[in-house]
Image (tube, rainbow, N blue to C red):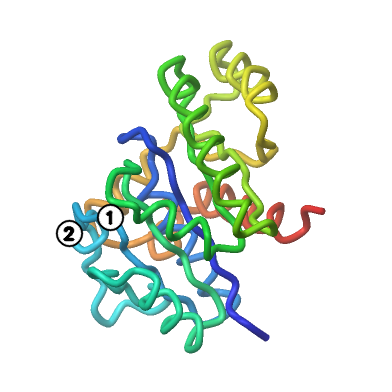
Amino acid sequence: MGCTTFSVANLKGGCGKSTLALNLAAGLMVRGRTVLLDADPQGTLAHWTNHEGVVGMPHVVAAGASLSRAIRSASSEYRYMVVDCPPTLESGHTETVLKMADIVLIPVLPSPPDLWSSTHMVEAVKGARSINPGLRAYFVRNQVEPRSALSQAMRQALRSCGLPSLESTLGRRAAYRWAALEGISVYQFGARGKKAVSDIESVIEEVFNHD
């Protein structure tokens, strides 16, 4: 079997992009050998991870200058790859990843500015599909509070953006922040991370089962 490449991208910072990328990679590790490629020049994941010797954490690699070469190299060694993209199109890194990925997940917070910025990602996906027509793209609603009217309104609004939104969501949970402080994923967070793990598992299973 070849490598399935996930990209996690959004052109707006602070949407939980690196949080999703790390925990997604940890969830995929349960299913097969996984690498987490940090294509963000800010190096968020390199600063975050502190997992030497921690079982179940993905190998993190800084993409460096030759991103396409790094993706091709990793795809020959791993079953799954997750690429954390920079929150900009200026470097060309995000476009490069989208042209090579199988799936792009776009985390979005339940706020009007995040909704407005998502239109730029829709255009980026459309552009990438001219070269990579098989690219599958999904919005992932992040920090969702089930009883929040804003969260429900966001779900409705995303339907008009031109890309599907997963039914699975990431809740507004302290476990994500505490795990980040410890440099681990919610999968290594024990009982405290159980609900967050359930979020990530739902996202993975929905993506794998999506037509």
Residue 180 is labelled as: none
Q: Residue at x 62, y 52 (%)?
A: 130
| Residue 102 x, y percent position in the rendering | 61, 63
104 displayed left or right of 43: right
Seen from the viewer's position, the closer of residues 43 and 52 is 43
Question: Furthest-right residue in view?
Answer: 211
Going by the numbered disc 1, the residue's amino acid type is Asp
Residue 47 is labelled as: 2
65 displayed left or right of 202: left
Q: Residue at x 23, y 70 (%)?
A: 64
Residue 144, placed above or below residue 105? above
Question: Furthest-top residue in view?
Answer: 149
Front position among marks 1 and 2: 1
| Residue 60 x, y percent position in the rendering | 31, 72
Residue 55, placed above or below residue 85? below
Q: Quadrant of residue 131?
A: bottom right
| Residue 161 x, y percent position in the rendering | 63, 25
Crowdedness near tag 1: few (<14), some (14–19) or many (≥20) residues, C-alpha within 10 Å? many
Going by the numbered disc 2, the residue's amino acid type is His
Element type where label 1 sits in the image: loop
Q: Residue at x 78, y 58 (%)?
A: 209
Label 1 – label 2 distance at C-alpha:
12 Å
Element type where label 2 sits in the image: helix
| Residue 20 x, y percent position in the rendering | 44, 50
Sooner in the amino-acid sequence: mark 1 or mark 2: 1
Crowdedness near tag 2: few (<14), some (14–19) or many (≥20) residues, C-alpha within 10 Å? few
Tags 1 and 2 in contact by the CB under 8 Å rule?
A: no
Q: Quadrant of residue 63?
A: bottom left
Residue 30, placed above or below residue 116? below
Query: Mark 1 — residue?
Result: 40
Residue 134, placed above or below residue 10? below
Seen from the viewer's position, the closer of residues 105 and 29 is 105
